[in-house]
Image (cartoon, rainbow, N blue to C red):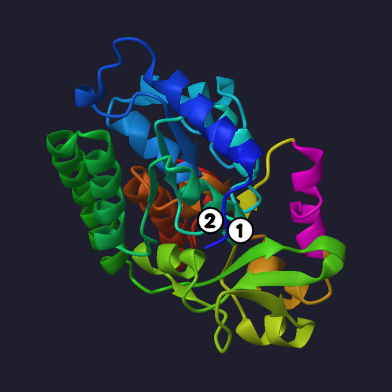
Amino acid sequence: MTALPLSLRRLALGAALAALGPGAALAEGPQRVIAAGGSVAEIVHALGAGDRLIARDTTSSYPPEVLDLPDVGYIRALSPENLIAMAPDLILAEHDAGPPEAMEILHRTGIPIVMLPQALDPDGVADKISTVATALGMEPDGEVLSTQVLARIAEAHEAGAALPQSPRVMFILSMQGGRLLVAGGGSSAEAMIELAGGQNAVTGIEGYKPLTDEAAVAAAPDLILMMNRGSDEAAQEHGATLADIAAHPALALTPAGAGGRVVFMDGLFLLGFGPRTGDAALELNGYLRAVAEGTDLHGVDG
């Protein structure tokens, strides 16, 4: 194995000593935690350990107080030097944190790193909560939180099963330049659509892939679902407005586009698969029920 560069070894050693400090109470579990991933920060806060967080990644935006923490960068473009300099005694990261080279360097510094499992179903959400709780030394709190979250998800599943029909939903991740990037099979968006009682209108592709205009028309979605990108200018480049969708040559020909049945939801809330998963599924279920019953989407509480 290639030796860690001397500069990083010194930085890691200094960070470790700073993290320990005089009289550090290691028996109480890690006290200087970096959350790399939106659902990670959510789970830490839901467990009542938000005061242990010293930094977060760009995707972490809930609860609002995490925005006051230093930002170590985008979860898939982390800089090991930035994280080491924060002197953490634990890094909690989503399964897709990276790049791989950065994660390898971090592992070699000796800083404890716990990678959360991917979650696309209730069991996966419970596993994520359990993983974080165990890493923080809060297993009993994790069991309580998992029970509460799973109960809410079960409520959403029942609401989905009670729909009079299963509307076809197209999740559009981006339509920059009029080019559609949509959610196919095995994606977190498809998992959420199905949990809420809908069906993915896009078939024949896996993950998030481009979709031709012809395929978009053939998909015939009853509802178009997108992320609310907020006011960030860079994010808005990948988003869209109702006017953009109505003017799109393919989307305008779909039942959803022609009927103005478009919903925007917060991305972390919708796709995070964390403590608020049940709430997100129930909100989406309300929109699906409105579509199924032919009522006004604007009357849905969201």
State the residue position of label 1.
101
- Above or below residue 169? Residue 72 is above
Q: Which mark is residue 237?
A: none
In the image, residue 237 lies in the stretch drawn in magenta: yes
Q: Amino acid at mark 1?
A: Glu
Question: Can residue 58 be seen in the rendering of this structure?
Answer: no
Q: Amino acid at mark 2?
A: Glu
- Above or below residue 244? Residue 178 is below
Image-based side of 70 in relation to 211, left or right: left
Q: Position of residue 72 (x, y in %)?
A: 62, 35
Circle 1 sits in a helix, a strand or a loop, which is it?
helix
Tally of marks: 2
Query: Which region shows up in magenta?
Result: 232-246
Q: Nearer the viewer, residue 253 or 229?
A: 229
> Of all residues shown, which one is farthest toward the top?
22
In the image, residue 245 lies in the stretch drawn in magenta: yes
The chief SS type of the magenta part is: helix
Question: Can residue 242 be seen in the rendering of this structure?
Answer: yes
Residue depicted at 41% across the width and 60% down the height:
289
Residue depicted at 35% across the width and 10% down the height:
22
Q: Which mark is residue 104?
A: 2
Q: Position of residue 249 (x, y in %)?
A: 84, 74
Q: Position of residue 117 (x, y in %)?
A: 36, 59
Residue depicted at 41% across the width and 49% down the height:
280
Q: Residues within 10 Å of mark 1 (few under 14, many from 20)?
A: few
Instruction: Tell me whether circle 1 and circle 2 mark residues in contact (CB < 8 Å).
Output: yes
Q: Position of residue 299 (x, y in %)?
A: 50, 44
